[in-house]
Amino acid sequence: MTTETAIRGRVLVLTLGGTIAMTPAAPGAAGVTPRLTGADLVAAVPGLDDEVEISVEDLRQVPGASLRLEDVAAVAERLHQAVAEGVDGVVVTQGTDTLEETAFLLDLLYRGPVPVVLTGAMRPPRAPGADGPANLLAAVRTAACRSVGDVGVVVVFADEIHAARHVRKAHSTSIAAFTSPGAGPVGHVVEGRVRLHAAPLRPAGFSATAVRPVRVEIVPAALGSDGVLLDVLEDRVDGLVIAAFGAGHVPAGWVDRLKQLASRMPVVLTSRTGSGSVLTSTYGFTGSESDLLGRGLISGGALDSYKARLLLWAHLAAGSDRPAIEAAFAARS
């Protein structure tokens, strides 16, 4: 276990909106919307800038559900600029609906040495027990610890530190909504100190030298589904992710269409369970994992469908060929 006690340096806080920044549009109005600035968020944490030098930039002011892949790519570009400017750490605040996906995509696109920490809130600022200030404080402290940069992009919530590769929002309302199924947190913030318990292996970096518009969608398997979405999407997407049953299984009626799709685009096989890996050779029935992989589908390994979609999107957007895409998934299996 590594205990990091030195909290120092310059931390840049980039804000994208989300619940952490939401208040009613007017006194007594129903519902909250993103309205607070990064300066507002920092001001709500007394003494935050006593430990580090804080600078703030508001990049977006939207709910997490409205963030786009292009927005995340812009954040990655800003991260690389921040490294060149000499910051010691970066915190990104955003809505929790898509936070796990943003973290994973940033971990693909950003490969700098400076710690990058994502956080947010499950309760808006004026709600009883609002968790935003505590999460922001823990995130800044984590971003100010140089050793965190070795882990890659992380998510800090409820004083837990999660690696982007494993983190998942597992509850719709709990302030401890973020977990890492099958792996657990890589560290904690305890009494203001960052304690790393593990340093997960981080696959080789990915550098998108060109970005072109591509579409990648997810089709989930469900009991009795006839796979009509496969027909609808055939001419409308550049890549496809299948969220299959169990260890990588689909209804037998899907098989011929999946083979046809896999002959013209990358089709990635994942498990809809949210934990565990797609198998390769245990089952042999029509629609089993070995059957589908034999028909040209690409194994998503232990990646869930959402993260597999982002990995596939990043490579297709950069113009990667099929061998490069297969190698990228094999490295994360």
Image (cartoon, rainbow, N blue to C red):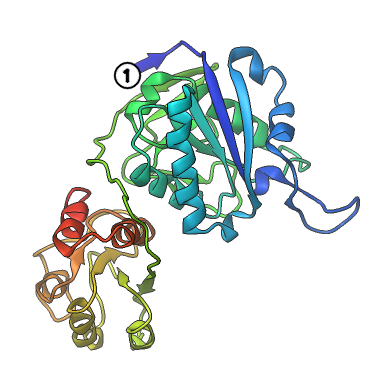
Q: Residue furthest top?
A: 6
- Against 270, residue 264 (above or below) is below
- Please state which amino acid type lies under the numbered disc 1: Met
Residue at the spot 23% in from the left edge and 56% down from the top edge: 277
| Along the viewing direction, whichever of 107 and 279 lies nearer the viewer | 107
Q: Is residue 38 above or below residue 256?
A: above
Horizontal side, residue 218 vs residue 160: left or right: left
Residue 216 location, x and y as percent?
A: 37, 69
List x then y, in percent, for residue 184.
Answer: 36, 38
Q: Residue at x 46, y 36 (%)?
A: 79
Q: Position of residue 319 (x, y in %)?
A: 27, 61
Quarter of the image for residue 64 reads: bottom right
Give SS at disc 1: loop
Q: Quadrant of the N terminus?
A: top left
Count numbered badges in the picture: 1
- Which residue is most to the right? 27
The answer to whether residue 174 of the structure is visible from this angle is yes
Q: Nearer the viewer, residue 93 or 120?
A: 93
Residue ID for mark 1: 1
Q: Callout 1: few (<14), some (14-19), or many (20+) C-alpha neighbours within 10 Å?
A: few
Look at the image and tell me whether residue 17 can be seen.
Answer: no
Nearer to the camera, 272 or 242: 242
Residue drawn 54% across the image and 29% down it: 139
Q: Is residue 79 above or below residue 31?
A: above
